Image: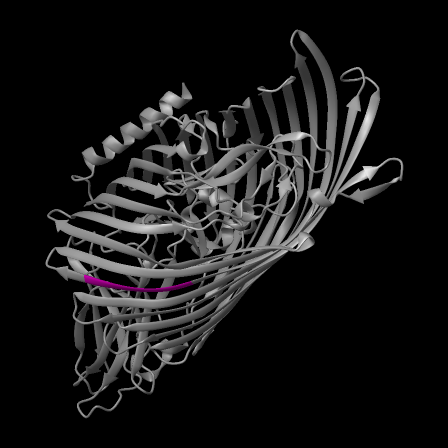
Amino acid sequence: MRKIYLFFMFVLLLTQAHAQAPGGKMPPGTAGKGPGNIGHVYGKLIDADGKPVGYASVIILQGRMDSATKKMKDVLVKGMLTKANGEFSLDELPLRGPLKLQASGTGYKTYTQPVVFPPIDKDLGNIKLAASTTQLQGVTVTGSKPIMQMDIDKKVFNVEKNITSTGGTALDVMKNVPSVNVDIDGNVTLRNSAPQLFIDGRPTTLTLEQIPADAIESVEVITNPSAKYDASGGNAGILNIVLKKNRKTGYNGNLRAGVDKRGALNAGADFNVRQGKLNFSASAMGNQMKSRTTGTTDRLNFGDNPNTHILQSNSNKSNGGFAFGKVGVDWFATNRTTFSVSGIKVHGEFKPEENINIFTDTIRGKDITHMYSERNSHSKMAFDANGLVLGMKHLFPREGEELTVDANYFGGKSKNNADYITDFYANGQGGTINRTDKQQILGNGKITFITVQTDYVRPFTKTLKLETGLRMSSRRTESNFNNYMFDHQAGEYKLIPGASNNFKNTDNVYAAYASISHTIKNFGYKVGLRAESSDYKGELINVKQEFKNNYPVSLFPSVFLSQKLKHDQELQVSYTRRINRPNFFQLIPFTDSTDKLNITKGNPGLVPEFTNSVEMSYLKTFKGNNTFMGTVYYKHTNGLITRFLTKETDPANGAELLVNTYINANSSYSMGAELTSMNTLTKWWSMSANVNIYNSKINTDNTGQPSQDALWAWFGKLNNTFKLPLNFEIQLTGLYQSKTNLPVNDNKGRQDGPPMQQSQNASQGYIASFYAVDAAIKKSFLKNNAASVTLSFSDIFRTRKMDQYSESVYFTQYYNRLRDPQMIRLNFAYRFGKVDMTLFKRKNMAGGMQGMQEVVQ
């Protein structure tokens, strides 16, 4: 019943949005507000002789409707005094107008000029003044970012407005991002494929569970990246996590702390100070985790004599936590040149424990032998991650011309020690112990990721622009995995060489791109070409085995065509070609038999897969902050990297095993339609809805196994925000995933050692439908709502679970898991700060701007 209700809610609200949006009215106080105050203008005031005009006033005014007089009036947005050299710089401006700049000083006439975005960074050049003075009245400036901003080629999800993820991790954030699906094991898919994860536009070694939600400013969802972006990622897009960065003049910060229903604590603090040409920011936070998971596996192995039936129930708990720190410094050398350096440090420790009860029936004709065993495991995992970013950005006097250079480093180390004790009972559950097997895993590894990139933008006219750049990335991975079995006769653990490995690899990617964009009246195009080459080298140290691949230069074209129509409508068609290179865990030729139901092995012979993607989108903006976007897409992949089931001999005991490895299948396709709607239904109720209807299939003719039948499926999300009296705010979100095929690809890596979960192979089968509902309530109080308390509830109905069926020529299997249902978190936050008003107390202003205040909602 709840599933049917949620489906009709999606359809009803989408229909309602379209029906009322054109006739809707602009909510009071929102006139002229755009998608976030992120505009930036700068320039220089000079006199008739070309000499700088110092300490003159420069202000930005916005036209707004006066609710009392019903007439338009100019309202102050921002202002400052020019430096001694005549330069000025005003940021955090709304992107939508009408805006205008006014400049004046003693002995000069007032200069007025309209300001229109984009570009977001606007160089107004040298402005000549003539004579006269003016004063400003005290005003209050307010600004607010919507929860989501939609563009024709990406969506930007503003985390600051998402209260259900408060106190959680980036995984909790992704659960609310449109187009993104997150399963209970933290596997993230974008349109049913695994996307590339970026932080601040660059690749990262961090996982989503290692990034606190409170450190994130926004998430950019790029479904069909252009030639400017890294071509890797195959048939998925890019998720770019933008971390918080503050550049407001003066000082400000916030403190926060919280606890969940199991007593896991979280706390954090942010601080920023900007004075003169320097901006310093720092963040620190920590999260405890007390996770609980239950599940069952019902598996029948056949095709051999004897057949076996295995019924397994598992209970997992993992206690631990991580600390996250970030420090950054910006030096504004001039109005047009900025140098930046920032660093990230993450440390985490976890102690997973698992109990598995295993009932095994061995079937020989009519004879059935029953056996019961119990396995207990205790592990300790630790990781350290470090990041460093060096950057330079230079803006030329020509509007829109800029050069950026940056170097990015991410590195991490991990350790994993695990003990497994399996007791075999003679007379079934509750009987005496017949035999005990002991196993020990000692593992460690490290990874280093270095990226160097430069980009240059050169406008030729107001409508014609060139973008070009170079990029080099290098990744080095090392892994040590030692498997020991306890020898009862010797009374000690002995290394099993055939089940252990020491491995290292290095892969490099070199790229260059160029693109031309041009607008002709209401028609626009952007054509780009990216060239990439790569090489890979790996070594199994313990057996002195090496393997390597050198991939020649490949070309990745992209074409974007757009046509603006009447009544705020736009059409866009895009085509891109992308690549997906096999990752470390897919290449490593080592058989991991820690989990007997999920034995894995990499394939060093894998080659990259190539994907051609076509999208067509329609964007419509209605009055009253209502937006609708519809997209149809088709993707075709050659040489798809997919899992493949085979048989091998266990090096530990010589038994025959079913092994999940990877191969390049012939091809695959995926296609679908996605609808996204953002609506301001009333002044107190806003809503976003997202529905993705899709179909995918893998052609496995080259494997000797049957291809999985294509299956139409759909996935949807609904996000409601209610602003109530007394500064209360409520957020209610829901999602539904219909029955769907097993994912066509899995690019997800893992920490060294056993995964502590029953991952399934991508043979034939399906994932059963499920839904989930989350809610949160927030109360703001104190002056300027500086303090807030948030109470959040996730998976209210205990329905965010994994029910899965898979089959092959060797087995059939039913599998289900439930992780951390009905989680409750309570969080407190307090923000503080002081805008530096000394700039507005100079004699030229005559105190006229001393009453100006800035309030950020």
Q: How is the image coloured?
A: one colour
Would you place residue 714 above or below residue 826 in this image? Answer: above
Q: Residue furthest top?
A: 366
- Give me the residue at 12% from left, 55% from top: 522
- Residue 557, percent from left and from top: 28, 56
- Residue 811, percent from left and from top: 55, 22
- Give me the residue at 72% from left, 13% from top: 369
Q: Nearer the viewer, residue 751 or 611?
A: 611
Magenta segment includes 516: yes
Q: Nearer the viewer, residue 32 or 181?
A: 181
Task: Give left or right: position of 63 versus 504.
Answer: left
Q: Nearer the viewer, residue 87 or 766?
A: 766
Magenta segment includes 822: no
Residue 564 is at least partly visible in this image = yes
Q: Quadrant of residue 760?
A: top right
Q: Nearer the viewer, residue 184 or 142?
A: 184
Q: Which residues are magenta?
A: 510-517
- Give me the residue at 58% from left, 45% from top: 750
Quarter of the rendering occupied by the C terminus = bottom left
